[in-house]
Image (spheres, rainbow, N blue to C red):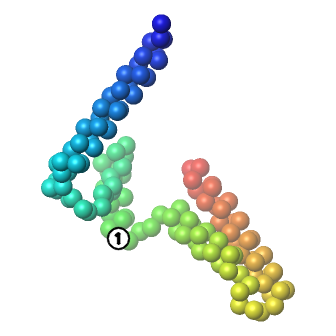
Amino acid sequence: MPRRDQRATDMASIFDILAEQRIADAIRRGDFDRLPGAGKPLVFDDEPFQSPEQRMANRILKNAGFVPQEVLQRREIAALREALAHAGEGGEGEAADDTEKAHIRRRLGMLIVTLGSLLRR
């Protein structure tokens, strides 16, 4: 005899399969083609668990062009990784290449540590 939690999981799987089938049928029929916003990217501006005050403050900052520190650091980390991959292609010599790579690695390490501390807040 199947356990109660196993039966609940089986029922959830059945509902998932039925839902997927109905969605696929609706797509084939074109039911979603004429919905408002069809063909446009989804916009996820609002965080559902934020207070209305926090949501408003975030919207004001975004409209003013503010970029969170975490995003800026992720961008710089990506740029430094790219620079590290291409370091030494300029032909300045092996010693200069090693110095440049060491500088990039130090900066990259500092940014990764800083980003980690920002994300733990």
- Looking at the image, can residue 69 be seen? no
- Residue at image coords 80%, 82%: 99
Residue at the top extreme of this rendering:
1
User: Label 1 is placed on what type of residue?
Assistant: Ala
Where does label 1 land, which residue? 64
Judge left or right: residue 92 versus residue 1. Answer: right
> Seen in the image, is 108 located left or right of residue 79?
right
Across and down, in percent, residue 40 comes to: 26, 62
Residue furthest out toward the bottom: 92
Residue 95 vs residue 109, the one in the foreground = 95
Residue found at x 70% / y 72%: 107
Question: Which corner quadrant of the image does residue 38 belong to?
Answer: bottom left
In the displayed structure image, the side of residue 37 where residue 21 appears, left or right: right
Which residue does the image show at 41% across and 19% down from the upper left?
8
Q: Where does residue 93 sit, x and y in percent of width and height?
A: 81, 90
Viewer can see residue 47: yes
Seen at 65% across and 78% down, the residue is 83
State the image coordinates of residue 120 (x, y, percent, origin top left): 59, 49
In this rendering, the answer to whether 3 lies above or below 48 is above
| Rendering quarter of residue 44 | bottom left
Specify few, some or many for label 1: CA neighbours under 10 Å numbering under 14, 14-19, or 20 or more.
few
Q: Nearer the viewer, residue 108 or 56?
A: 108
